[in-house]
Image (tube, coloured by chain):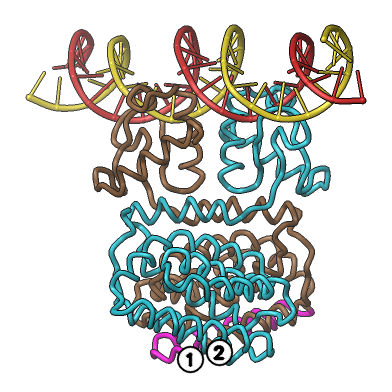
Chain colours: A cyan, B brown, C yellow, D red
Amino acid sequence: MRTHQTVSAWLEHELAAGRLMIGSRLPGERTMAEQLGISRASVREGTRVLEALGVVRAGVGSGPQSGTIVTGNPALALDSALRLHVASAHLPVRDIVETRLLLEVWAAEHASKDSPALDRAAVLLDEMDGHDDAPAAFLERDALFHVALAEAAGNVLVGAMMGSLRGSIAGYTQRLTTRLPAWDVTSGRLRREHRAILAAVVAGEGARAAGLVRDHIEGFYLEAGIDDRPDAG
Amino acid sequence: MRTHQTVSAWLEHELAAGRLMIGSRLPGERTMAEQLGISRASVREGTRVLEALGVVRAGVGSGPQSGTIVTGNPALALDSALRLHVASAHLPVRDIVETRLLLEVWAAEHASKDSPALDRAAVLLDEMDGHDDAPAAFLERDALFHVALAEAAGNVLVGAMMGSLRGSIAGYTQRLTTRLPAWDVTSGRLRREHRAILAAVVAGEGARAAGLVRDHIEGFYLEAGIDDRPDAG
DNA sequence: CTACGTCGTGTGGTCCTACCACACAAGATA
DNA sequence: TATCTTGTGTGGTAGGACCACACGACGTAG
């Protein structure tokens, strides 16, 4: 095992033993190096990995918000991983869109109708009504609405994946809108569909919500025209 | 932006520009440090992150298999991320099992009936017939069978996720088998169900395959009894 | 001419030391 | 009492040194 992996192994052990939890502060890099019997450079390499995986967060200075702190942000790992693997052409955009679709349909069907995420979703819909002339602002809230919907299903993993997928195809989606024949017509339709989806979820009609989500997403891509080019922005 | 992120930013740029692709060798650490205007320590931190994300692979020595090489292994990132997030209790095992179920059901429905992965799946089933008295060996092939099935859907992302999910709940599944009333009875049922699933997929009956997969997975967990304890091995 | 062993060279792996920027807290000062 | 200064611990970065490794080129013995 390589030296820098000592850190993640140690952290996993401490977490499993309950000596560390989310919010805990790790020892300083110099201290950890001494305790683990490795150099500070190796500690840092290990910490960088943990940071990239969304397990810890590093902050300089002193005080309660400084130092290396255990967090729980699985989306971060997916985020950067997706970006790079898409760039390497190993991960077709089509696969991401497809995965997004299957996750969202599932989430809509399993969403809990009294999840606080649905309140956020409702707020986003109101905001979108006021931004239907600005595609960029509209799409950003559109994406957040879908993520909120996914989180309403109560599955951390699905929520995190949706958040990352959203980010990795944001530029792609934005480019697709330029192909639309008439943005105001499309945005009006999208807004109506969003309302219908949310209403179905709140009403506890999972199956209907799932169908609406599927039509909603597939409809958008169909209208904009499928585009399989990688997101080389 | 922190210094070590220069590396991933640079790599993403090179990949997007087509100057690097999977299989390409990156410049040496010393060279890269000089070219990017950063220290070798920072280059190494950046490389460690890329390695953890499954984007590159580092090898010592000289020759064609040495140096830092661009790979495409998205499962690696998910793998370690899942392990640690489960350990931090931020990611319930229940969520992973649930996600696995939804991915597999989808994959079974969308599997291409002439995917080479199905041949691997068939071989695994034969091997399982010869290991029905050894739970450990049986379960390992069981897991691989399910991953192969997922890959048959042709979605890289879904395949990678299934592979990682399998790993992160392997220990959990193994523990569940100890609760079974009679292993030989269960294994016999599992083997029959596997055959039926594969047959449905090969026959191109996606919907039926999906239903069989759902019953297969849910049936196992039901028989073994649900267990939400984290995988603190 | 061939087969084997040696050595050079470039690779990542690890360590050490030094210095920097930062942010808070305690103390000194007006 | 309010403000400023200073101390201290944090991660961030840099540069240098040495190691183990693996291949390829070279030399040597057969």
Q: Residue at x 77, y 69 (%)?
A: B178
* Residue A216 horizontal/vertical position (percent): 46, 83
Disc on res. B207: 1
Instruction: Confirm whether residue A216 shows in the render.
Output: yes
- Amino acid type, mark 1: Ala
Disc on res. B4: none
In the image, taking residue A164 as reference, residue B68 lies left or right, namely: left
- Asked which secondary structure carries label 2, the reply is helix
Q: Are marks 1 and 2 in contact (CB under 8 Å)?
A: yes
Relative to A128, does residue A4 appear above or below in the rendering? above
Does the magenta run of residues contain B50? no
Relative to A47, does residue B121 appear above or below in the rendering? below
Q: Chain of mark 2?
A: B
- Asked which secondary structure carries label 1, the reply is helix
Q: Residue at x 30, y 69 (%)?
A: A178
- Amino acid type, mark 2: Gly
Quarter location, residue A66 = top right
Q: Chain of mark 1?
A: B
Few, some or many residues within 10 Å of mark 1 (<14, 14–19, 20+): some
Report the residue marked by disc 2.
Answer: B211
Whole-Å distance between the Cαs marked 1 and 2?
Answer: 6 Å
* Residue B215 horizontal/vertical position (percent): 62, 87
Quarter of the image where the N terminus of chain A is located: top right
Q: Which residues are magenta?
A: B181-209
Q: Residue at x 31, y 60 (%)?
A: A230
In the image, taking residue B198 as reference, residue B35 lies left or right, namely: left
In depth, the one of B190 and C16 nearer the eye is C16
In this rendering, the count of numbered labels is 2
Relative to B106, does residue A29 appear above or below in the rendering? above
